[in-house]
């Protein structure tokens, strides 16, 4: 009797746990290659994209968001957004507020020095570190002070701090003295 699980097209049933990562990496490499080698459509030409097909930029941005891990902490007087970005220079990171200052966007690009490697005859045996664009979006809570947002990048970790707005002081009921005549 054969007790093996048949291979199914759904990756959840795959006997190889690394298959999703491997296929994703290969797809990323092919996407990067086609982006670099495929000429942009000229003015007046129709692209091969239909109304139901997501744009390449949307797919790329979605992948970049999914692959950028982050932690969000709520402190007594602030919110902290901690994003790992090893190997990225602070000058290559953009932190900005969008959509009426309610959405915090952290973006940038991790690059490989191709020209330098090609000149020196470097051949990669294994490439595991992610290269390419990264992006994360965070919706700021209502009590976040958008005028008091700061960012610090140290040791490959970006920490963005948004101070909380001080809660309004509760007005105590005013006692009125009755004067009886």
Image (cartoon, grey):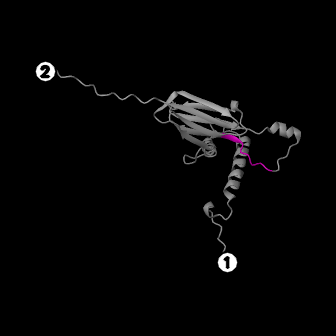
Indicate the quadrant where residue 38 lies: top right
Mark 2 residue element:
loop
Q: Could you classify mark 2 by the number of other residues whose Cα lies within 10 Å: few (under 14), some (14-19), or many (20 or more)?
A: few
Vertical arrangement, residue 153 with respect to residue 18, above or below: above
Q: Which quarter of the figure is the N terminus placed in?
A: bottom right
The disc placed on residue 2 is 1
Q: Quadrant of residue 171?
A: top left
Q: With 146 as the anchor, is 169 left or right in this view?
A: left
Which tag is nearer the camera, tag 2 or tag 1? 2
Q: What is the x, y in percent for residue 66?
A: 61, 46
Q: Residue at x 88, y 42 (%)?
A: 121
Question: Number of marks in the image?
Answer: 2
> Can residue 72 be spotted in the picture?
yes
Q: Quadrant of residue 107?
A: top right
Per the model, the C-alpha gap separating discs 2 and 1 is 100 Å
Residue farthest toward the bottom in the current orientation of the protein:
1
Where residue 96 sits: x, y (%)?
Answer: 58, 31
**Magenta-drawn stretch, dominant element (helix, strand or loop):** loop
State left or right for residue 65 relative to residue 89.
Answer: left
Place of residue 110 in the rendered image (x, y in percent of width and height, measured from the top left): 71, 38
Q: Which tag, 2 or 1, sits closer to the chain's start?
A: 1
Secondary structure category for the residue under label 1: loop
Asked whether residue 48 is drawn in magenta, I would say no
Q: Is residue 121 above or below residue 177?
A: below
Residue picked out by circle 2: 180
Q: Is 43 on the left-hand or right-hand side of 52?
A: right
Question: What is the x, y in percent for residue 148?
Answer: 54, 27
Tell me where the magenta segment starts and ends, as one range. Answer: 126-133
Labels 2 & 1 near each other (Cβ < 8 A): no
């Amino acid at each position: 009797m054969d007790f093996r699980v048949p291979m199914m097209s759904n990756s959840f049933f795959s006997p190889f746990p690394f298959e999703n990562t491997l296929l994703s990496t290969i797809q990323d490499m092919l996407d990067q290659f086609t982006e670099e080698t495929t000429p942009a459509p000229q003015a007046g030409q129709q692209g091969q994209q239909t109304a139901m097909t997501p744009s390449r930029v949307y797919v790329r941005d979605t992948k970049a968001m999914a692959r950028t891990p982050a932690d969000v902490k709520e402190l007594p007087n602030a919110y902290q957004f901690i994003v790992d970005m090893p190997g990225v220079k602070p000058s290559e990171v953009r932190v900005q507020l969008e959509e009426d200052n309610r959405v915090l966007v952290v973006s940038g690009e991790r690059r490989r020095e191709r020209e330098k490697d090609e000149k020196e005859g470097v051949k990669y045996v294994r490439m595991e570190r992610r290269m390419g664009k990264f992006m994360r979006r965070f919706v700021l809570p209502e009590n976040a002070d958008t005028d008091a947002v700061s960012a610090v990048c140290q040791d490959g970790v970006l920490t963005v701090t948004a101070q909380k707005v001080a809660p309004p002081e509760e007005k105590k009921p005013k006692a009125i003295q009755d004067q009886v005549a």
